[in-house]
Every structure is written in structure tokens, then in C-alpha cells.
Amino acid sequence: MLTAAACDMHLEQLFARVLQLHELFTRAGIPYRVVGGLAVFLHVSERDPLRARLTADVDAAIGRDDLPAAIAAAVTAGWVHRHVAGVDTLVDADAPRARSAVHLVFLREKVRPDYLEPVPDSSPAKTQEGILIAPVADLVRMKLTSYRLKDRVHIQDMDAVGLVTAEIEATLPEILQARLQEVRASE
């Protein structure tokens, strides 16, 4: 059945997942930050909630050395580690669905070998709830590096609310500046 409440339910599930991740990693002493679409959503919604687009899942960046501790922490919550199609995920052991997964990427490493840049390791920002999220400058760099359609849309969303500043643009290498200009030209 079609229902408008489905959006609210999905958002509640996403935030329940990210709060659980925060609690697990904080208790285990694992430095992390939320990256990807959820981080963009949080930054954009702070400026203009009506421009924030919902995302399907949770992406988090950790240090590669913290993966064993992250897996152990996940087990305490009933999650299991899966390595699928080159991606490390933490999923609910009882209902392992991609949409309920936490996708892990590693700080200071390229997500894919052909990517131009590794995942940045700047100090994370913090939400009112204490959730650590990648700063806007890191998200811009990551989105311009992966450069899929949804990443370009995330750049447009951040740019539309004034998050992609001249200061951030000036820190980008030439190829990422060119990609930013392509995104802006396509709006």
C-alpha cells in the first residue's frame, strides 16, 4: 500500500541505525564519521530542511586498523560483518538487507583503486546528538572523487544552500575543480 508515512519510517530507521552505530563505536573507542548521503542530508538540512534529500543507507569512515574492533562491536548489537563486492558492511544478522547495512570505507584509502583521491581524514563535525559526521570540505572532495550521478546531485544540494564555499573550492586539485564546474554548469 502506498503511504506518505513510509518516508518518516525510513528516516526513523536510518537515524536509529546511525545512533546505534554511534553508541557502539563510541563505547569501543573507535573514531568514525558518517559520510555519504546521510552526512550530506544532515549538513543540508541544517541550512534548509526542505532541500535535504533522503538517502537509502548509512556510510561510515573508519581507520583500516579499527575494522576488527568495529566487527566485534557490531556483534554485540546483533550485526554481522559481510564483505560483498569489495565493500565491507555491517548488517543485521537476523535480516541482512542492503538497505539496513552500514557501509564502511577507510580513512586515508581510496574507496576504489581508480578513484583520484583517498577518503579524507579531517576532524569530524558533531551533530546535537553527538553523531560524528564528515565536514563539508571532505564530503565535497569525496563526492567529486566518486562522481556518480547521485554524488553530483549531492554536490548540487550542498552548493544550493551555500555549503560549497570559495575556500573549499580553492583547496581542491584542478581536476576536482573542473568537475565542480561541470556540476554547476549542468544545473
Image (cartoon, rainbow, N blue to C red):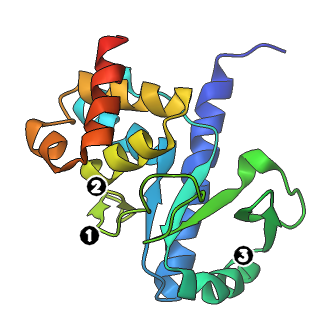
Find disc 1 in the rendering and name its residue: 123
127 left or right of 21? left
Q: Residues within 10 Å of mark 3 (few under 14, many from 20)?
A: few
Q: Can you tell which mark lies on residue 135?
A: 2
* Residue 135, placed above or below residue 92: above
Q: Assign a secondary structure to mark 3.
A: loop
Q: Secondary structure at mark 2?
A: loop
Residue type, mark 2 in image: Pro
**Dot 1 amino acid type:** Ser
Front disc: 3 or 2 = 2
| Mark 3, residue position | 77
In three-dimensional space, the C-alpha distance between marks 2 and 1, rounded to whole angstroms, equals 7 Å
Residue 181 lies, in percent from the top left, at 27, 24
Residue found farthest to the left: 167
Question: Disc 3 residue type?
Answer: Ala
- Identify the element where label 1 is drawn: loop
In the foreground, 96 or 117: 117
Q: Earlier in the sequence, mark 2 or mark 1?
A: 1
Q: Are marks 2 and 1 in contact (CB under 8 Å)?
A: yes
Image quarter (top left, top right, bottom left or bottom right) of the C terminus: top left
- Tell me the residue at 21%/35% (across/down): 164
Pick the quarter of the image with the N terminus. Answer: top right
Circle 1: is it few (<14), some (14-19), or many (20+) Cα within 10 Å?
Answer: few
